[in-house]
Amino acid sequence: MSKTKLGISVGFLAAGIYASGLLSAVVTVMLAGYVLLREEDEWLRKSAVKAVAIILVFGIFSSGIGIVQDLFRILDALVGTVFSFLHIGVPFSLDQVLNYLLDIMKTILLISCSFQALNQGTVRIGFIDKLTDKYM
């Protein structure tokens, strides 16, 4: 099993990067930055980029849901100026349900990637793997 310059195994560092995605995107980006600047192991570098890509994709989806919420707030404000008794919101709180589902999916994905990384394996994620392979 290959080691990093820190003296820990490559799989353990990759698992740590994936697991850090559950806590903070900033920590994940910093760890990935370290790997890209200092480590030579190609699998570890791809895993670091993949962890950041997963966080970015889920962040984009979450932002898209936020835009829908904002559009309903704008509509509510416009309608509320004329009809003060009328309130317009996202039907059935679908925005909250979708945010919860995204969080659950991200958590499951990052945990499964962490466990696979311990054995230097990977969880195949179609378009993220294609982008990682194309640009690395």
Image (spheres, grey):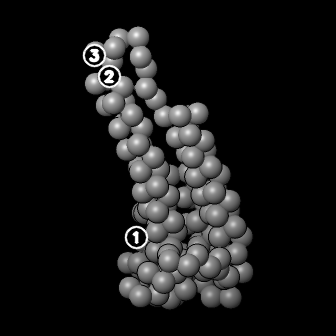
Disc 1 residue type?
Gly
Disc 3 residue type?
Thr
The residue closer to the viewer here, 15 or 76, is 76
Which quadrant of the figure contains the C terminus?
bottom left
In the image, residue 87 lies at what x, y percent? 43, 20
| Residue ID for mark 3 | 81
Q: CA distance from mark 1 to mark 2?
A: 47 Å
Label 3 near label 2: C-beta < 8 Å?
A: yes
Q: CA distance from mark 3 to mark 1?
A: 49 Å
Of the two numbered discs 1 and 2 in the rendering, the one whose residue sits closer to the viewer: 2
Q: Is residue 5 above or below residue 89?
A: below
State which tag comes first along the sequence, 3 or 1: 1
Disc 2 residue type?
Val
Which quadrant of the figure contains the N terminus?
bottom right
In the image, residue 133 lies at what x, y percent? 46, 87
Point out the residue furthest to the front here: 83
Can I make out residue 46 in this image? no
Q: How many marks?
A: 3
The residue tagged with tag 1: helix, strand or loop?
helix
Q: Is residue 32 above or below residue 129?
A: above
| Residue ID for mark 2 | 79
Residue visible at 31% across and 31% down? 74
Q: Is residue 86 above or below residue 53?
A: above
Q: Is residue 81 left or right of residue 60?
A: left
Q: CA distance from mark 2 to mark 3?
A: 5 Å
The residue closer to the viewer here, 48 or 129, is 129
In the image, residue 106 lies at what x, y percent? 60, 57
Q: Within 10 angstroms of label 3, few (less than 14), some, or many (20 or more) residues? A: few
| Residue ID for mark 1 | 33
Residue visible at 41% across and 49% down? 63
State which tag comes first along the sequence, 1 or 2: 1
Q: Is residue 105 left or right of residue 90?
A: right
